[in-house]
């Protein structure tokens, strides 16, 4: 017999309320504690610990913390002292929320400080990594939590490399770096779309150097090579280097053949594919999870970042590279960040001053134009490079800058050509016609021969009689 429609609605509403009650974490919802103490005894400290664990499992976190603090303050020599301190941190972690997780992080770090040799120290560090990992935003949003998660996971792998939590922390680190690399890639592509190729190349170069396991590393290298090619012929070497990395390190990429053709067009050798890189990329493509249409649609409404394309193997980056200076900055052409040697001209100079009264007695150096040569010495010869001057300051070299350094730097913002409107075109045509009509009128008086005027030498001199 079919139920009445009103009864069906009541059953659906009751089921919805029941599911919400279960998700709210009410006292009758029991979640088993991960590391209970099974030793049965009637000691008072053990009784307090068991009572607090029971409260944690039933969601009574505040009551559990009060009981655990009573145990710590009353029985300072108890064998459950370390377990009680760890349970306080676990209660904050289970409670959830930004405030509770901040308290849990402080408690876990205190536990590692007081008990660094216990097995639970690695677990505490793993929980700290999870706290920031669960609060990560998407790649194009605030990345503070992602950076914190990256640092904490690295610390776990460095301090506890043989822990059972190390493999999980390594995979979390790959996922975090996928999110960070995705954010940098989007910024670089934004600059490239706007025509700021030096800024785009700077961002994309940082992505491929810092995050080689990035799922779009081959695409990043291809866009990097194209950005260098659009900056001029002087950057063909950098474009060729990016194409070489595609052919060698990402042989299964969709851009591998195009990169090889570009290397041939630039008269550069085409390298052979690295067998290790080939095996790694093949494994990643076979084990990569491709999100469906439904998953991509739901990701638009989720706060969590998309990490299904993250690498499943390989060693993540354990050090942070320093970002390079964009090529459009004059200091980038003047100083090589790797060697520190000057490679061009710059309006920024540095010199050592030993006389503290130079600011009051010497003329202002900013009054002279930038790039002027140093004054010659008293004997008419230029001071040697690196030699100390008479006033205690380092002498500047009098050698002129090289002609190669005088080349203009690449522009960060390309000029945009605006289309002219019909009114502007009509106004230009009318102005051109008026100019053509005015040209014969101006040429007619110029065709008439000019009347000769006597010069000052031919004019008669009028003399006045002497009075």
Image (cartoon, rainbow, N blue to C red):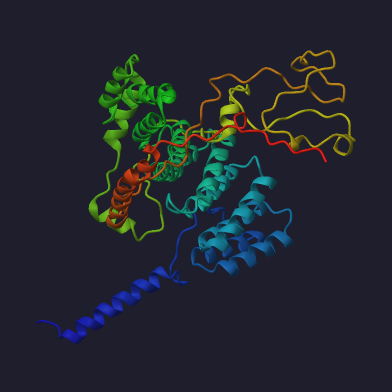
Determine whether, in the image, residue 128 is placed left or right of residue 68.
left
Residue 25 is left or right of residue 333, and the answer is: left
As displayed, is residue 445 above or below residue 370? below
Q: What residue lies at 50% left-to-right and 67% top-to-bottom?
A: 59
**Residue 419 image position (x, y, % from top left):** 31, 49
Total numbered badges shown on the rendered structure? 0
Residue 432 percent coordinates (x, y): 31, 47
Q: In the figure, residue 300 lies in which quadrant?
A: bottom left
Give how far across and how far down residue 75 sits, in percent: 72, 59
What residue do we see at 32% from left, 22% from top? 247
Image quadrant occupied by the N terminus = bottom left
Up-down relation of residue 374 to residue 109 (above or below):
above
Q: Residue 105 or 163: which is nearer the viewer?
A: 105
Q: Vertical placement of 166 versus 281: above or below?
A: below
Give the position of the C terminus as an image quadrant. top right
Q: Position of residue 375 (x, y in %)?
A: 77, 22
In the rendered image, which quarter is residue 398 located in?
Answer: top right
């Amino acid at each position: 017999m079919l139920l009445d429609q009103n009864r069906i609605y009541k059953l659906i509403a009751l089921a919805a309320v029941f599911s919400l009650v279960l998700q709210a974490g009410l006292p009758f919802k029991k979640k088993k504690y991960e590391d209970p103490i099974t030793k049965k005894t009637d000691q008072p400290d053990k009784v307090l610990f068991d009572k607090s664990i029971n409260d944690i499992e039933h969601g009574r976190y505040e009551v559990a913390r009060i009981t655990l603090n009573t145990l710590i303050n009353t029985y300072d020599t108890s064998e459950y002292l370390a377990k009680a301190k760890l349970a306080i941190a676990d209660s904050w972690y289970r409670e959830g929320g930004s405030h509770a997780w901040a308290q849990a992080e402080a408690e876990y770090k205190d536990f590692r400080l007081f008990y660094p040799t216990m097995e639970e120290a690695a677990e505490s560090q793993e929980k700290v990594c999870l706290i920031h990992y669960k609060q990560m935003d998407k790649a194009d949003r605030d990345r503070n939590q992602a950076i914190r998660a990256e640092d904490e996971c690295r610390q776990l792998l460095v301090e506890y490399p043989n822990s059972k939590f190390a493999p999980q922390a390594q995979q979390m680190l790959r996922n975090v770096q996928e999110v960070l690399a995705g954010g940098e890639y989007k910024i670089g592509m934004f600059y490239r779309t706007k025509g700021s190729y030096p800024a785009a190349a700077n961002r994309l170069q940082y992505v491929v150097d810092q995050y080689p396991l990035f799922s779009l590393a081959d695409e990043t290298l291809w866009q990097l090579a194209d950005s260098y090619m659009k900056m001029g012929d002087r950057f063909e070497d950098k474009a060729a280097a990016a194409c070489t990395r595609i052919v060698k390190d990402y042989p299964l990429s969709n851009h591998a053949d195009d990169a090889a053709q570009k290397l041939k067009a630039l008269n550069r050798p085409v390298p052979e594919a690295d067998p290790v890189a080939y095996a790694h990329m093949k494994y990643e493509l076979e084990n990569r999870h491709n999100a469906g249409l439904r998953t991509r649609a739901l990701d638009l409404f989720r706060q969590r970042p998309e990490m299904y394309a993250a690498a499943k193997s390989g060693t993540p980056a354990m050090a942070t590279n320093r970002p390079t200076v964009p090529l459009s900055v004059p200091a980038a052409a003047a100083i090589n960040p790797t060697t520190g040697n000057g490679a061009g001209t710059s309006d920024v100079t540095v010199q050592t001053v030993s006389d503290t009264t130079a600011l009051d007695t010497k003329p202002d150096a900013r009054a002279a134009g930038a790039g002027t040569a140093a004054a010659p010495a008293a004997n008419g010869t230029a001071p040697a490079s690196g030699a100390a001057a008479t006033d205690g300051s380092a002498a500047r070299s009098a050698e002129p800058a090289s002609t190669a350094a005088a080349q203009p730097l690449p522009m960060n913002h390309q000029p945009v050509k605006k289309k002219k409107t019909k009114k502007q075109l009509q106004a230009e045509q009318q102005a051109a016609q008026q100019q053509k009509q005015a040209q014969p009128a101006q040429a007619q008086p110029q065709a008439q021969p000019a009347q000769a005027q006597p010069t000052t030498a031919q004019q008669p001199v009028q003399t006045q009689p002497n009075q």
